[in-house]
Amino acid sequence: MAAKKPEFEQSLARLEEIVRHLEKGDLPLSESLCLFEEGTGLLASCGKMLDEAEQKVVKLRKGPDRAPIESDFEGEE
């Protein structure tokens, strides 16, 4: 079974932790580079998760019988 992907919130928390460490400026260069690489990977992962979530967003509107109709969020004009 494949390992479960980290949730957005966990990835974001780790990214914030990395930023705090890097902003201190007291890490050796090699460790800073490793954290930077991890951070860029997390940033890409979070961006992908946000893009996927955005694609799932739907807008509800009322139909002729006043029942909600789902339509794509991007379909709004």
Image: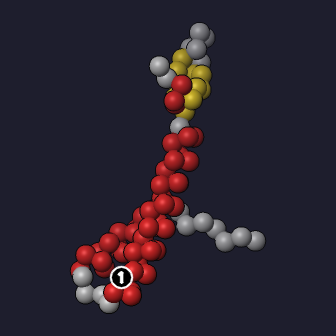
Q: How many marks?
A: 1
Can residue 11 be seen from the camera position used here?
Answer: no
Residue farthest to the right, as pictured:
1
Type of the residue with mark 1: Ser
Q: Secondary structure at mark 1?
A: helix
Q: Position of residue 28 (x, y in %)?
A: 32, 90
Give above or below for 39 relative to 69: below
- Image check: 40 left or right of 32? right
Give above or below for 10 relative to 61: below
Give above or below for 34 relative to 5: below
The residue sitting at 57% across, 29% down in the picture is 72
For residue 66, which quarter of the picture? top right
Specify few, some or many for label 1: CA neighbours under 10 Å numbering under 14, 14-19, or 20 or more: some
State the scheme by which the image is colored: secondary structure
The residue sitting at 24% across, 82% down in the picture is 25
Residue farthest to the bottom, as pictured:
28
The residue sitting at 59% across, 9% down in the picture is 64
Residue farthest to the top, as pictured:
64
Q: Position of residue 39 (x, y in %)?
A: 42, 70
Can residue 32 be seen from the camera position used here?
Answer: yes
Q: Position of residue 24 (x, y in %)?
A: 23, 80
For residue 65, which quarter of the picture? top right
Quadrant where the image shows the N terminus: bottom right
Q: Position of residue 34 (x, y in %)?
A: 43, 81
Please give the residue where the numbered disc 1 appears in the rendered image: 32
Give whichever of 68, 54 is nearer the camera: 54
